[in-house]
Image: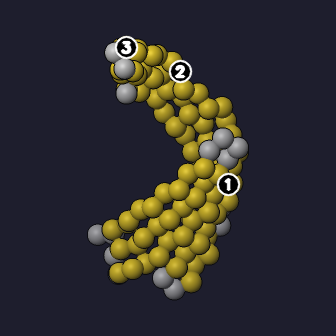
Amino acid sequence: HETDKGYTVQVAAGPVYRADALSVYGGPVLFFTKADGHCTGRIAETIVDVTGDIKQDLQLGGYIGLAVEVAETVDVNVEYQLSADSAVLGIGLTYRF
């Protein structure tokens, strides 16, 4: 599987509520994706070669996230994004130095 010349753009803005080691945030998000894809594979004894465009028009969705400070320089982040065509859950670790 290969993807050439692709990009995803996300633009989001929203409030953040902070209480001690906990931050909760969320709001609207706009995003779109465009890429040229190429996939070569095998189905049984047949070699398959497919080329196509991946395109997601501008969509409005929402996001909500949580950040927890687990040490003085380390946060654990969880974020969920939802739109009409997709749902994404992300988990991350932030280290400040």
Q: Is residue 41 left or right of residue 37?
A: left
Which residue is at a point 40% across and 15% down the rendered structure image? 48
Eye-nearest disc, 1 or 2: 2
What is the residue that sits farthest to the front in this orientation? 44
Q: Which residue is mark 2?
A: 53
Secondary structure, mark 3, is strand
Q: Is residue 21 above or below residue 89?
A: below
Res. 46 mark = 3
Within-10-Å neighbours for mark 1: few <14, some 14–19, many 20+: some
Quadrant in the rendering for residue 28: bottom right
Residue 7 in percent (x, y) is at 48, 33
For the residue pair 1 and 15, the one nearer the viewer reads as 1
Gap in angstroms between the C-alphas marked 1 and 3: 42 Å
Looking at the picture, the colour scheme in use is secondary structure
Please state the horizontal and vertical placement of residue 43, each as a whole percent of the image.
39, 21
Earlier sequence position, callout 1 versus callout 3: 3
- Please tell me which residue is depicted at 50% across the width and 71% down the height of the picture: 67
Which residue: 38% across, 65% down? 93
The label number, if any, that marks residue 62 in the structure image: 1
Q: Tell me whether circle 2 and circle 3 mark residues in contact (CB < 8 Å).
A: no
Specify the quadrant of the image occupied by residue 15: bottom right
Q: Is residue 16 left or right of residue 69?
A: right
**Does any portion of residue 40 appear in the rendered image?**
no
Name the side, left or right, on which 51 lies relative to 74.
Answer: right
Q: Residue furthest bottom?
A: 20
In this view, the mark in front (2 or 3):
3
Q: Amino acid at mark 2?
A: Asp
Disc 2 versus disc 3: distance between alpha carbons? 23 Å
Please tell me whether residue 90 is drawn above or below residue 2 in the rendered image.
below
